[in-house]
Image (cartoon, coloured by chain):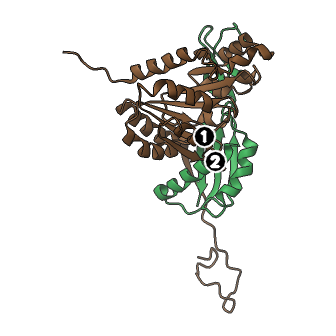
Chain colours: A brown, B green
Amino acid sequence: MCGVCGCGDDSQTTRKHVHVFAQPAPRVIQLELDILSKNNLFAAENRRQFQEQAVLALNLVSSPGSGKTTLLVETIQSLQADYAIAVIEGDQQTSCDAERIRATGVPAIQINTGKGCHLEADRIGQAWQNLQSCSPDMLFIENVGNLVCPSGFDLGEAHKVVILSVTEGEDKPLKYPDMFHAADLMLLNKIDLLPYLDFDVERCLAYARQVNPALQILLVSAKTAEGMPAWLDWIKRQRLELKPSVEVL
Amino acid sequence: MHELSLCEQVLELIQQQAGLQAFKQVKTVHLEIGKLSCVEAEAMRFCFDSVVAGSIAEGARLEIEQPEALGWCSACQQLMHIEQRFEVCAHCGHFPLEIRQGEQMRIKYLEVL
């Protein structure tokens, strides 16, 4: 409606003044909504399902090339006789990693994130729908190799495990504090290469604890199996703690 | 570059609110992105326009407020500004500080028609 004459007609022939059509005033809607609230809802639903079904879900995060997939293959081969295992693989492109996992005989679903640099909880929920028929005891989620973005996206996992290899700088925990802060366990991988490098293990661990004083740390080599028993024990302990307590009469 | 998917999440929340609160156009999107939140405000601005193109938020002004990070020292009971997550208490050297502000990523308000 015209703000001057009240007419709704702006035809040129009868116009005696410039019609003014007032814009409605914008209104303010207070929201205070967490930007990640949708992801967090999906993550909470995933977590509820994992707990209900006593599935230990671990979210493995690291930079590209830290040896995550090799570590995971070795881990699966050591555990699969005693536990049903399923894997979700996240990469921007290709299904190479899922194929390496499937070669061990455990089911694996590859999620290609395309332009995305991390996995999100709704994609994990969809993949889980296809994996839960295998009734896994453990679900390993190998996130996209990236030390920044996956830290903020809860997937519903029981723990984030950050893997750092000794071929990277020992100051990675300080450079990427959010990821080391978000993790419950850090695996320092490829320790078989330490004799050939100038990597200062003590300094690296001090940096990691500076960012996250509660961080548990294990030194491993997926290649020589050094330190692997402690990592496997850690996984088994987490799985035991998950199981709903059974009352013995 | 998770700013792109954060912008997508912002748009999804806006579209959800449009249904709940009956608005047809968004004029302003006001975000609160804490200094410790691991998000680059510039990258958010860069992604925002292309993410909202063709939606009810097309052409909306993006405002980003970046609250300072605050840490609480449980030893000397003081609140202080911090720049990083792993700082020691500026008064007594205690570590770690409890983060009280600076991690938030929120849509604070919208201006809508």
* Residue A49 visible to the viewer: yes
| Residue A128 image-quadrant placement | top left
Category of crowding for the residue at label 1, using alpha-carbon neighbours closer than 10 angstroms: few (below 14), some (14–19), many (at least 20): many
In the rendered image, which quarter contains the N terminus of chain A? bottom right
Residue with the mark numbered 2? A94
- Callout 1, which amino acid? Asp
> Could you tell me which chain the residue with mark 2 belongs to?
A
Category of crowding for the residue at label 2, using alpha-carbon neighbours closer than 10 angstroms: few (below 14), some (14–19), many (at least 20): few
| Residue B94 image-quadrant placement | top right
Residue at image point 48% right, 58% down: B19
Is residue A55 toward the left or the right of residue A143 in the image?
left
Q: Which residue in the rendered view is the most extreme toward the left?
A: A249
Number of residue marks: 2
- Callout 2, which amino acid? Thr
Q: As displayed, is residue B110 above or below residue A41?
A: below
Numbered label attached to residue A215? none
Residue B6: x %, y % from top left: 63, 45
- Which structural element holds mark 1? helix
